Image (spheres, rainbow, N blue to C red):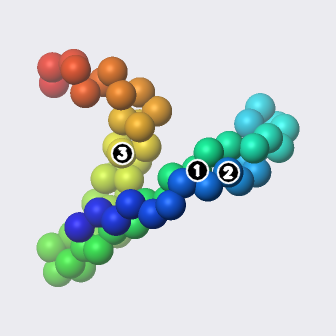
Amino acid sequence: MLVLGGVNRKPAVVDEQVVPRTILSLGAAIDHRVVDASHGGLLFRYLKKIVKNPQLLDEKP
């Protein structure tokens, strides 16, 4: 289960400078008997990539 948190403005490092950024918090509830931490990491890495580049959803695999 994916859990969307709040959207907040927080400081972040971009090109070695601290700038305000809009941050969306995401969480997940995953049964450890089915998915281990490495699979969860891959899932969140993929979600981060899609959020940064939504046009990738239109491409065929």
**Sequence-first disc among 2 and 1:** 2
**Residue tagged 2:** 9
Tell me the residue at 29%/74% (across/down).
Answer: 29
User: How far is the residue under mark 3 from the one under mark 2?
Assistant: 20 Å
Q: Is residue 53 left or right of residue 17?
A: left
Q: Is residue 51 left or right of residue 30?
A: right
Say what secondary structure mark 2 lies in. strand
**Residue tagged 1:** 23
| Amino acid on which the number 3 mark rests in the picture | Leu
- The disc at residue 3 is none
Q: Residues within 10 Å of mark 3 (few under 14, many from 20)?
A: some
User: How far is the residue under mark 2 from the one under mark 1?
Assistant: 6 Å
Q: Residues within 10 Å of mark 2 (few under 14, many from 20)?
A: few
Res 1 quadrant in image: bottom left
**Residue tagged 3:** 47
Q: Could you say where residue 26 lies in the image, as x and y percent from the top left?
A: 43, 60
| Amino acid on which the number 2 mark rests in the picture | Arg
Q: Residues within 10 Å of mark 1 (few under 14, many from 20)?
A: some
Q: Is residue 32 above or below residue 1?
A: below
**Sequence-first disc among 3 and 1:** 1
Tell me the residue at 30%/24% (across/down).
Answer: 56
Say what secondary structure mark 3 lies in. helix
Q: Nearer the viewer, residue 2 or 17?
A: 2
* Labels 3, 2: front one: 2
Q: Does any portion of residue 9 appear in the rendered image?
A: yes
Q: Does any portion of residue 38 appear in the rendered image?
A: no
Q: Is residue 5 above or below residue 49?
A: below
Q: Could you say where residue 23 lies in the image, as x and y percent from the top left?
A: 58, 50
Q: Nearer the viewer, residue 11 or 37?
A: 11
